[in-house]
Image (cartoon, grey):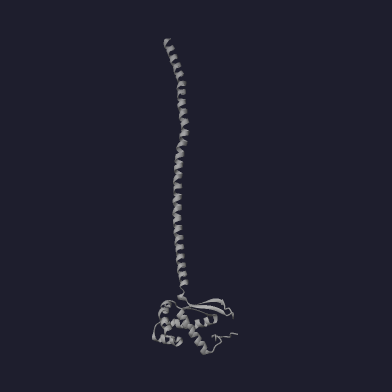
């Protein structure tokens, strides 16, 4: 059972284990990506990340401490040069472990451990994904904003046409209604005159007869 086992001894003596981790750390800093077992990758992450953290501050003291763990001048130059420039803005988590499945033969769990800031494919995908999201959000807002004014412009002419149709219909209705009334008054006028005309003639005849008498 585990029972508070903090260090995985990897089935090796202390000196053998230190030499193994030193060689793995040198390979990781040099090549930026190595393939090993999951157990070794986890132990290597604990071993190398404090060294990467010291590499961000280039001082003689940090160089001597890192050299005591790595023992290779070329790796020290690489760590305090290009690697430190890449990981300078990162607060921690400099490595990534990716499981690769079982190894053919002994079925050991394999993994790839790499420096996060040196995986250009994932970094490019993140940048491209962020740019696409921003474009879709902007295009969505602009499309909605363009659709709303268009709908308002289409609705405005309909409201303006309605009064014109009403104005055109009302005069025609009035003309049709008033025309017969005018004709009736004109037709009634002669009839009234004809009715009054005989009465006037009869009165004239009576006055003439009285005068003769």
User: In which quadrant will I find the N terminus?
Assistant: bottom right
Who is closer to the viewer here, 182 or 120?
A: 120
Residue 129 position within the rendered picture, expressed as x and y whole percent measured from the top left: 47, 67
Give the residue at x 47% y 33%. Answer: 176
**Position above or below: 173 against 22:** above
13 left or right, relative to 171: right
Q: Residue furthest right?
A: 1
Q: Is residue 110 above or below residue 206?
A: below
Q: How many marks?
A: 0
Q: Is residue 128 visible?
A: yes
Residue 112 position within the rendered picture, expressed as x and y whole percent measured from the top left: 52, 77
- Residue 175 rendering spot, x and y as whole percentages: 45, 34
Q: Tell me if 59 is positioned left or right of 8 in this view.
A: left
Above-or-below relation of 142 to 17: above
Comparing 52 with 100, the one in front is 100
Q: Which quadrant: the C terminus?
A: top left
Q: Residue furthest front?
A: 105
- Residue 93 in sight from this viewpoint: no
In percent of width and height, residue 107 lies at 59, 79
Is 174 in front, or is 84? Answer: 84
């Amino acid at each position: 059972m585990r029972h508070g086992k903090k260090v995985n001894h990897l089935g090796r003596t202390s000196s053998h284990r230190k030499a193994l981790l030193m060689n793995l750390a040198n390979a990781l800093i040099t090549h930026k990506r190595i393939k090993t077992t999951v157990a070794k990758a986890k132990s290597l992450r604990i071993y190398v990340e404090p060294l990467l953290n010291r590499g961000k501050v280039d001082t003689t003291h940090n160089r001597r401490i890192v050299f005591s763990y790595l023992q290779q001048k070329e790796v020290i130059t690489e760590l305090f040069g290009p690697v430190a420039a890449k990981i300078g803005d990162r607060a921690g988590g400099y490595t990534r472990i990716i499981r690769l499945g079982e190894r053919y033969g002994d079925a050991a769990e394999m993994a790839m451990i790499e420096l996060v800031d040196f995986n250009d494919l994932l970094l490019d995908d993140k940048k491209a994904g962020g740019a696409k999201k921003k474009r879709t959000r902007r295009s969505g807002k602009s499309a909605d904003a363009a659709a709303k004014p268009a709908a308002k412009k289409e609705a405005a002419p309909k409201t303006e046409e309605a009064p014109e149709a009403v104005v055109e219909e009302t005069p025609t209705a009035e003309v049709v209604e008033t025309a017969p009334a005018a004709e009736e008054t004109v037709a009634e006028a002669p009839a009234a005159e004809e009715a009054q005309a005989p009465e006037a003639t009869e009165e004239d005849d009576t006055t003439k007869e009285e005068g003769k008498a």
